[in-house]
Structures are given as structure tokens and as C-alpha cells.
Image (cartoon, rainbow, N blue to C red):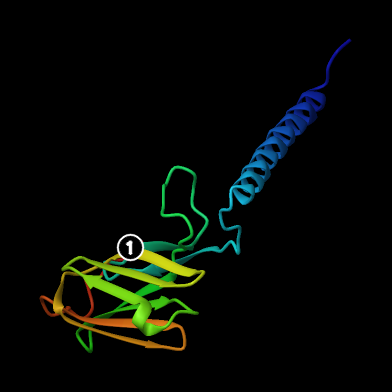
Amino acid sequence: MRVMWWSRHWKKFFEDMEKEMEELERMFDELFTRGLKGETLGPYVYGFSITIGPDGKPIVRRFGNVKPPIIEEEPGFREPFVDVIVDDKANEVKVIAEIPGVSKDKIEVEATEKVVRIRAENGERKYKTQVELPVEVDPKSARARYNNGILEITLKPKEPIKEGGTKIKVE
């Protein structure tokens, strides 16, 4: 009996679907097992933002408490949504983090020339992230404000930020 090409196609399709269902089942089993061990289950948050850096290259930042299985993070912490804004007119770098549900005395912020670390804990609300900065900054110039769940950290760059860039011919 001759097997038509479309029969092989559908067979492959269903085999792939079966593999996906097995992976989902494995994930649900893992979540259920973690729940029985007393680990916190949810809420699960995951997202990402894409911005264009000062060099014109896209910067992808992810946030939330769902991580790829390769990365080992501290259990119970979620990565907050963070945005970095380089303001060449004001000559400053702003790191804005969304960390609702914590009081400002529970927020720890640390800065180096290249990195800002944020950690906040208030009962079940736990946030932790490390943000790489697009330019070197003076960590001693850092100021932080927290209002309505938004943490805003302002830093001065080591060297003035140049306005504009290199003109590029579009072909």
C-alpha cells in the first residue's frame, strides 16, 4: 500500500502535538509537586520590554517570576518590570522599577558604575533584579524615590551624554 506524502505530514504533526502535551503534563506535575512541598504557587508573572539603546541597538529586558529552567534564581522572588531611560538633555540615567505592594523601608538599592541592584521584600511580595546600565555612572550621585509602587533611581553619568549620533545612509 502506498503512503501519500500528506499522511506522513499528518503523522508528524500528531507526533509533535503529543510531545508538546507530554511537556505540558511534566510541567503541571512539577508545579503540583512543588505545591505539596510548601513552595509558593503563583501568581505567575512573565513579560518583557524592548527598547532602543543609545547606540541604536534593541535592548530586551524580561521581568516576572517565571524563569527558563536553566537559570537558578532565589525561590519566591520575582523580577520586576524595569525600564532604563538615558536623558541626554538632563544628562542623567533613570532606572524605573515597578515594585508594588512593598513599603519604602523594605527596599534595598545598590549601585556601581555599571549596575544597579534592587531587592525588596514585604511579606509575600518579593522582588529582586540586577540592571546593567548603558553608560557608566557615578554611583555616589544616585537618588531614589518610591511612590505608588514605582521606584525611580536617578544617576549622573561619568561623562556627559552626547546628543544625537552618527548619521546613517538608508539604502
Rendered view: 166 above or below 74: below
Is 136 placed left or right of 107 in the picture? left
Residue 158 visible in the shown view: yes
**Residue of label 1:** 57
Position in image of residue 32 (x %, y %): 66, 47
The residue positioned 74% from the left and 33% from the top of the image is: 18
Which quadrant does the C terminus fall into? bottom left
The residue positioned 41% from the left and 54% from the top of the image is: 74
Q: Amino acid at mark 1?
A: Lys
Secondary structure under the numbered disc 1 in the rendered image: loop
Position in image of residue 1 (x %, y %): 89, 10
Depth order, front residue of 6/161: 161
Q: Quadrant of residue 96?
A: bottom left
Is 36 placed left or right of 123 in the picture? right
The residue positioned 44% from the left and 42% from the top of the image is: 70
Residue 87 visible in the shown view: no
Depth order, front residue of 74/130: 74
Is 110 placed left or right of 64 in the picture? left
